[in-house]
Amino acid sequence: MNKITKKLFGYFTMLALFLVVIVFIGFYSVFRFYDYRFQEDELKERARTIKTQLETFMTTTGPHRGQGAYLRFLDDISMADAHIISRENEMLFCGNGTGPEKEPSEKILSIAEDIFASEQDQQLKDQDPQGARVLYLGFPVKKDDKTLAAIVIRDTLDMDQDSFFLSITILGCCLLFALAVSGILSAFLSRRFMMPIQRIASVTRKLAQGDYQVKTDVYDKNEIGVLARETDILAEKLGAARREREALEQMQKDYIANISHELRTPVTVIRSSLEAICDGIVSGDKLKEYQEQSLKESISLQRLVNDMLELSRLQNKEFPIERTGLDLLMVLDDALRATRIIAGKKDIHLHYKRPETEWYMEGDYGRLRQMFTAALDNAIKYSPNGSSIWIKTWKMQDGHGISIKDEGCGIPEDEQEHIFEKFFRSKDAKEKGSGLGLAIMKSIADRHSIALKIRSKPGQGTEVIFTLQSTKIYPGSYHERHQNDTLDM
C-alpha cells in the first residue's frame, strides 16, 4: 500500500469513526429525551385517571363502596407520591401512612395554591439534591365547576438503565460491524481510486524515458479521466515532435550534404584550372579556355551562394521585406517582359490576356517579380522547343488566382511532395540548377500570404497556381484608397 493509499484509508477511517461518535451521541440524546418524555406522558395519564376517578366519587351521592380502598392505594395507582390538599391547605390524603415523611412540602403546597388560584392544571420540573429530575403535576378536583381539592403528584424521573444498556449494546454492535465493513470498503476504494493515477504515473515515467507510444487506457468521466486524456495527447505531441525533430535533423544532414555536393563541383573545377595554369601545363588558346571555365564556375558558385543567402533571409520571419502599394498584375507583366527573350530563343509562345482591372495590394515588388520570373523561367526551361505556355488570371468570390501552365515533361507523382524542399531536383531532370528556385519561390509566396500549388502529370506538363484571398486585394487604386483614408481622418 503506497503513501497516498494509506492516507486515503486513514481519512476514510477517521471519517467513519467521527460518524460513529456522532451517531452514538445523537442516539444517547434522543433516547434520553424520549425516555423522559415517555415517563412524563405516562405520569400525566395516570394523574388524569386519578382526577377523573376522584371527581366521580365526589359527584356520587352517599357513601361510595371502594372509595376508601382507592385512596388507600393511591400511591400504588399513581406509582408516585400523591397528595390531596383542600382549599385551606389541609392535607386530605397523603397516600399510605401518615408519618412526618408524608407531610406535603412547601413546593407541593405552593403548587396547590396555584391550582386553587387559577383552577388550571399545573406542572413543575425541578431537581433533587442528588441532581435527579423531579416532576410535579397538579390537577384540580372539581364538583359543579367548583374546585374542592387539588391533587399533586411528585415523581422522580429515572432513565431505564436496562433498556438503555440493551439499546447501546445493540447499537454498538451495529456500529462496529459498520465500521469494519467501511474499513474494508475504504481500503478497496482507496486502491481503486489510485489505480488510474498509478497508470498515469507509469505512462509519464515511460514518456520521460522516450517511449511516446504508450497510452494510459483510462476513460473515467472525471478530473482523473481528463488528466489521462491530456497525458495521451501529450504523448502524441511528443511523438510528433520527435518525428519532426528527426525529420529536421535528417533535412539538415541532407542540406549539408547537398551544399557540399553543389559547392564541391565548381570549387574543384576552379582549383584544377588554377593549378594547371600555375604549373604552366596549359598555354595559348587552352589557357584562355581554362580561364573562361574558371570564370563560368565562379559565376555559378556566386549564384548558388546568393540563392542560399536569399532563401535564408526569406525563411527568417524576423527578416523584414519591403511592403509598398503595387499592382500585382503589373508585376506579372514585368516578369513576362523579362522572360519573353528567353522564351523566344526556344520558340516558345507565351499566351496571356491581361484582364482590364487592377489588383492592388501591399508587398515587395522585387520579391514578387522574382517569384513570377522563377515560375516562368522553370516553365521555359522544362518545355520543349516550339511549345506553348499559358498564363491565366481569374477572380473568384473569395479570392484571386494566377496560373502558369507549360507543356513540359512534368513531375513524377511521387516527387511532387518534395519539390519545394531545398536542393531537390527531379531524377529525370536534364537541366542544370541549384535546386533552390522553387524553395525561394515558395518562401516569397508565404511571406505575402499567397497560396502556392503545383499540378503536374508526367508527359502532360506542369501548372503553377498562385491564389490570394480577396481581403488582400484592395478595391480601386492603392493610392486612391490611402488618399480616401487620409481625407476621412
Image (cartoon, rainbow, N blue to C red):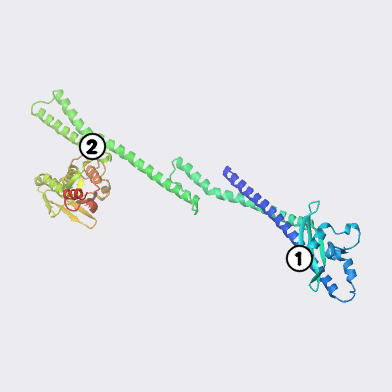
Q: Amino acid at mark 2?
A: Met
Q: Earlier in the sequence, mark 1 or mark 2?
A: 1
Question: How far is disc 1 from disc 2 in space, using C-alphas?
Answer: 118 Å
Please determine whether, in this image, residue 67 is positioned above or below residue 4: below
Please determine whether, in this image, residue 330 is positioned above or below residue 40: above
Task: Quadrant for residue 132, please give it.
Answer: bottom right
Check disc 1 and report the residue beneath it: 118
Going 12% across and 29% down the picture, which residue do you hit? 291
**x, y (%) of residue 241?**
38, 43
Check disc 2 and report the residue beneath it: 308
Task: Quadrant for residue 149, please give it.
Answer: bottom right
Please determine whether, in this image, residue 23 is positioned above or below residue 249: below
Q: Quadrant of the N terminus?
A: top right
**x, y (%) of residue 279?**
15, 23
**x, y (%) of residue 322?**
21, 41
Examine the rendering and report whether any part of residue 29 can be seen.
Answer: yes
Going 86% across and 65% down the picture, which residue do you hit? 74
Q: Is residue 349 left or right of residue 250?
A: left
Q: Secondary structure at mark 1?
A: helix
Q: Which mark is residue 3?
A: none
Q: Amino acid at mark 1?
A: Ser
Which one is nearer the viewer's eye here, 275 or 131?
A: 131
